[in-house]
Image (cartoon, helix red, strand yellow):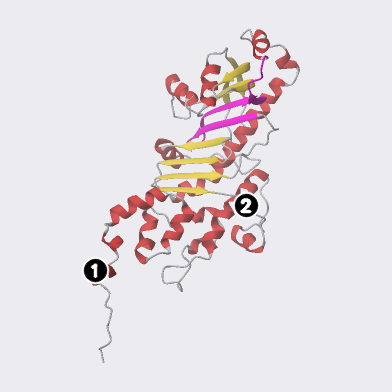
Amino acid sequence: MHPKARIHADPLLEVDQFDRLPDSLVLVILNNVEDVRSLGRCSAVSKRFYGLVPLVHDVYVKIDRVVTVDGDAEDMLNLSAPKPRNILSHFLKMMLFTIIKPFHGMRGPNGAGRPLFPQLAQHSPAQVLHNFTHIRSLRIELPSGDVGTEDGVLLKWRAEYGSTLQNCVILGGTQVDRKPVGAEHELYSEDNGSMPESFYTNGGLKLRVVWTISSLIAASTRHYLLRSIIKDHPTLTSLVLTDADGQGTLSMGAEQLKEFRENQLSASACSNRTQVPACNMKLKYAPYLELPGGIALQGATLVAIKPSTSNGTHTSRKESDAFISGAFDGPFKFAVKALMKRRTYLLEMNGF
């Protein structure tokens, strides 16, 4: 009778080769993951990952959808409290809940311990980032733009903030579509480089004012909602809040974040947003622009906005022009450059 053969595992194969990587290299990998949901799942893989994930420098938070707030959500976001007078602020808070929910039930690597992110049981949506202690670059993407527009209308904005607004540029158009065949010469023949009289009489100027105010309210509301995140993460050197539609982008660099922390935030008296300061605006207009890719933009408008007072910050004209020309990508970058060559109309706006 032959003795039973025994199979022994190769001890070399039992060693997890990934464990041989130094922590510094693992952090490089995790920094390239960026997505906060994926990082949360990585935390549940092992005790080692559980300790390394909070040390990542680059984090990307994508909010996929707006959810109906049920009982659990009400407890988590404290929605039983008085509703904010600005419905946009309340709307954004509901969207931020979609980040919290996937993490709330996750456990540590031993499977039976405390929740992986215990702070998510608290009320503030900013707690989704509370366990990350070394964030330098943070990018948050909302599921859609804040300002509603009709089909075919173009509205894009980009704003820079410190403790208050520093720069804002708005690009709009009453109609964006494929270049109409045979219509371009007629449209160009009406363009003498000046604002047409009809612009003032048919509601054209009023529409641009609505675009401007709506974009500034959206930017100041986003800025106000970021205050707790900035306070909790002193290592931040870059913060961007954008949306999946590409409508609006709020950005803060290292110097702007420092200025935010050193100065008191001026909140609007009427709603949950930062107060918009008194501003000087430069408006440029073209009735029709041909953009790369066969795109036609009618009623093209560029509005460049700066506070009337510097508030201790000084931006040269060269820096301002660089911000405006680099605000958008693709064919809209071309539109901005074309509009910057047009005649400038100066406007003033009180703070609100």
Which residue is labeled 2 in the image?
94
Secondary structure beneath label 2: helix
Residue 192 spot, x, y in % from top left? 63, 7
Q: Quadrant of residue 349?
A: top right
- Please check the rendered image and state whether residue 159 is part of the magenta-colored stretch, yes or no: yes
Residue 139 visible from this viewpoint = yes
Pick the residue in front: 99 or 281: 99
Residue 105 spot, x, y in % from top left? 53, 66
The reply to whether discs 2 and 1 touch (Cβ–Cβ < 8 Å) is no
Q: Amino acid at mark 2?
A: Met
- Please check the rendered image and state whether residue 83 is part of the magenta-colored stretch, yes or no: no
Secondary structure beneath label 1: helix
| Residues in magenta, as a range | 154-182
Residue farthest to the bottom? 1
Residue farthest to the front? 1
Residue 195 visible from this viewpoint = no
From the viewer's perspective, is 134 left or right of 248?
Answer: left
Residue at 38 percent across and 52 percent down: it is: 30
* Quarter placement of the N terminus: bottom left
Which residue is labeled 1 in the image?
12
* Quarter placement of the C terminus: top right
Gap in angstroms between the C-alphas marked 2 and 1 = 51 Å
Q: Neighbour class for label 1 at 10 Å: few (<14), some, many (≥20)?
A: few
